[in-house]
Image (cartoon, helix red, strand yellow):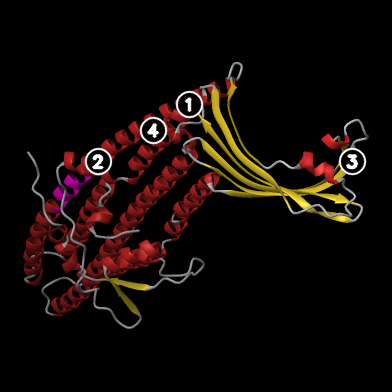
Amino acid sequence: MKPKTKTFANLIIALALLAAGPARAGTGELRLTVEEAVKRALTHNLGLQQQKLAPALSEAAEQVARATFEPALFTEADLGRSPGQVSSQRAGLDPTSTTSVGGEVGVRKSFSTGTSVELGLSSQALLGGGGLDPAYQSGVTLSVRQALLNGVSRSANEVAITTARLARKEAQQKLNQQAEEVLARTLEAYFDLHRALAQDAIQALAIRTSETTLKDTLTLIAAGKVAGSEEISVRYTLQTQRRAKLQTEQAVAEARDRLARLIGLVAPSSLATPTIVTVETTPSLPGAAELERLRAAALKGRGDYLAAQSAIEAQQARVNASKHKLLPKLDLVGSLFASGLSGTSSSDSAVDPGYWSSYKMDRLGWSVGLVFELPLGNDRAKGELKSAELELRRARLAAEQVQQTIAEELNRAWRAVQLARDQLALTEAAEQVVQSKLRSEEERYKAGKTTAHILAAVQAEAIQERLGRAQASADLHKALVNLHATAGDLLDRLHLAV
């Protein structure tokens, strides 16, 4: 049988009514709604702020990976002396030794398609006895290299970028998961404080009730309706309630301190505990939905499962790239170049003019060829493939383990909601019974038909049931929060973002 669903607001009406008394903030008290608490937590929680750096770090890694395909500017300069060469006009004579100075500047660019392009501009001039000769040779070269086997796969060449992108995606998903956990802890802390304030107010009411009973007892003793020894029982009950009040006050202080630090209300090193007072405003969350719907929501929105899926994608990309590296390298290489002589050799140059007739090369040329490379054994690529396949298997097992954890946590959270709802209903019924019993005993005591000890016992039962109802209400609200946190949909349902 499917349980009926209720809105989260309806489920916390009892707790809101109990907290109505403490919610009247006085001087120095901070009235805090649950929406304000969770928004502050998402902004100021220290653990969440630390986790927010992970996507930024992964984005920087992706930027580094993309830099592989950025163009590069290169340049070089050289100075050298040649033993000389014989020109056609000086055949049979001594060669002419020359000293040359030159340089080159160009741009090199690689593409993920396995293509690399290089464009260079070079120039060279001769040094003679009179200095630099005004004539110089210049050239332009365009070279292209295209991988045909190993290196032609775009996905394999971009594996570092893909891995970095998926790492950033995984970091964002883990951030969302931690935000869900912080949000759940904040809601639980808020409801704990709500419950502690309600129980403290109930304990204060118990003290006032005991004080009234003491006054009534003294009046009855004076009228001779009860024995004087009854005063001792009543005073003992009053002291017991006052001691219990110390414990509820401590519980309030601890709940305030925990909530304040979760939402960053105090400095990390501060020992101060703000006087936080909860108010009736609460988020509207649906009650426990069907388990299968919650499981589907968890597989769609839980950060740890989505991060596991991203890890599988990253490992699959590594496997594909490793398989591609098993192929031999076969590259097509081609170039186009043009060169020529500019300027005119000076008449007083130490370089024989005949030299330029052999040095001058006004021409346009091209070349094309194939480069083949086959690693012997290729153990490195085989080892990388084996490692990548094992990592992929581990990533898939990790995703299955997350699925198993989700199913287990959902079942446990679902049962906790059902138990908390039943306990709240039974506690409310028990409280009605004990209240009726208390009214009867109070009437009997005023008529002198019972003892103060019996009345005190019934009053203690009534107080415990009231305290139990506040605890049961808080437990139900916390159980619902935990259920939706397990399903990974708290941020969506509260329309919040990290």
Residue drawn where x is 45% and y is 28% of the image = 319
Mark 1 lies on a secondary structure that is: helix
Q: Is residue 150 visible?
A: yes
Does 255 sit left or right of 161 as displayed? left
Question: Compared to 254, does 81 lie above or below?
Answer: above
Q: Rounded to the nearest whole Å, what is the CA distance between mark 4 and mark 3?
A: 72 Å
Instruction: Please name the amino acid that badge 1 sits on.
Output: His
User: Which corner quadrant of the image does residue 203 belong to?
Assistant: bottom left
Q: State the separation of the CA atoms marked 2 and 3.
A: 88 Å
The disc, 4 or 2, on the residue closer to the chain's N-terminal end is 4
Q: Disc 1 and disc 4: Cα gap in Å?
A: 26 Å
Which image quadrant is residue 439 in? Answer: bottom left
Which residue is denoted by mark 2 in the rendering?
410
Instruction: Tell me the element at label 4.
Output: helix
Q: Amino acid at mark 3?
A: Ser
Mark closer to the chain start, 4 or 3: 3
Vertical order, 366 against 259 (above or below): above
Question: Mark 2, residues whose alpha carbon is within 10 Å: few (<14), some, or many (≥20)?
Answer: many
For the image, the number of numbered tags is: 4
Q: In the displayed structure, would residue 207 be above or below residue 53?
A: below
